[in-house]
Each structure stands twice: as structure tokens, then as C-alpha cells.
Image (spheres, rainbow, N blue to C red):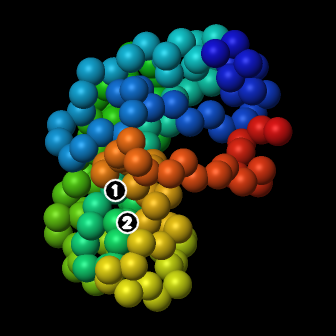
Amino acid sequence: MRSLARDAGAGYWIGVFPEGAIQAAGPLQALQPGAGWLAQIARVPLVPVAIRVVVRAGPGPEAFLRFGTPCLTSELPSQLAAVLQALDADLSSADPERPPAGYLLRVTGLGARPDEVTLAVRWLTRLSGFGRTEAAPELPVPAHGRMRP
């Protein structure tokens, strides 16, 4: 945690899941104090980010992120809940064939068949924790995928 605080203070982005992990759709769960502690020690604001991994019209799951405005530790629960609620509203009103209005498509698949399990699908499954079994193979983490060497 101290090395993360040093990195945050030096200007690196640090990703922390204040609920402990990516959660299934639903209301915001109880927040753990780690993100607030890091922000206070590093003297940086928190940026609430809502993440949803959903299956829509495509061949596999899609991840959507919505960023809030920087906030104080005391504001994080309400700010994160508001960003999450806005993301859910955007997804529920969007055409499932296209990204919701105001969202950018950053990564595209290779035109996989609907029944094909691609690398992107496996990574999103691993990221979300859905469908994990004891028999599922671990995916390698490429060197370029780390935040810090």
C-alpha cells in the first residue's frame, strides 16, 4: 500500500476497487477504506469510476466505464453511487448494437462468431470474475499490461 501511495503521489494512476472487486450489477456495496487511505497519504483526489461488464448484442461481454469528477474521500460513496447510477441509466436506454451516446469504442474484437471464446472474452471474464471455475486456465499477464515495471 505504501508503494502505491508513493506512485500516486508521483503522478501515476492507481486503480483501486473500493468495493473490493468488480461487483455484479446492482446497488453500490459497502466501501473499504483503502482508496481513501491512499488518497490521503498521497495527497491526491479520488476519481470515481463506474464499471459494468455486460452482454448486449455482440458475441461476448463488453466493459463500459464512466468517470466521475475528482472528489474528497468523504464524498466518494455518494459520487461513486451517482456515477454508477448514470452508467446503468445510459446502458438501459442505449441501442444494444451501438455504444451508448457519449461513450467511445476503444477496443474492438476481431469479428468473432457468437459462440467463439476470444481472448477479449476471456480477459473480460477474468476481470469480472463471472464464470470462473477451478478448471479455468490462468491467462498470462503481458509485460506491457502492467502499470509499473
Give the label on residue 53, or none: 1
Q: Which residue is mark 2?
A: 62
Q: Quadrant of residue 147?
A: top right
Screen quadrant of the C terminus: top right
Q: Position of residue 132 (x, y in %)?
A: 35, 47
Residue at image coords 28%, 61%: 54
Regarding mark 1 in the picture, which secondary structure is present there?
strand
Q: Are marks 1 and 2 in contact (CB under 8 Å)?
A: yes
Work out whether residue 105 or residue 146 is closer to the camera in this orientation and state it: 146
Q: Is residue 60 visible?
A: yes
Mark 2: which amino acid? Glu
Work out whether residue 103 or residue 128 is closer to the camera in this orientation and state it: 128
Residue 67 is left or right of residue 26, and the answer is right
Screen quadrant of the N terminus: top right
Q: Position of residue 103 (x, y in %)?
A: 41, 68
**How much space separates mark 1 and mark 2, taking CA atoms?**
5 Å
Work out whether residue 117 or residue 49 is closer to the camera in this orientation and state it: 117
Give the label on residue 1, or none: none
Crowding near the residue tagged with mark 1, few <14, some 14–19, many ≥20 C-alpha atoms within 10 Å: some
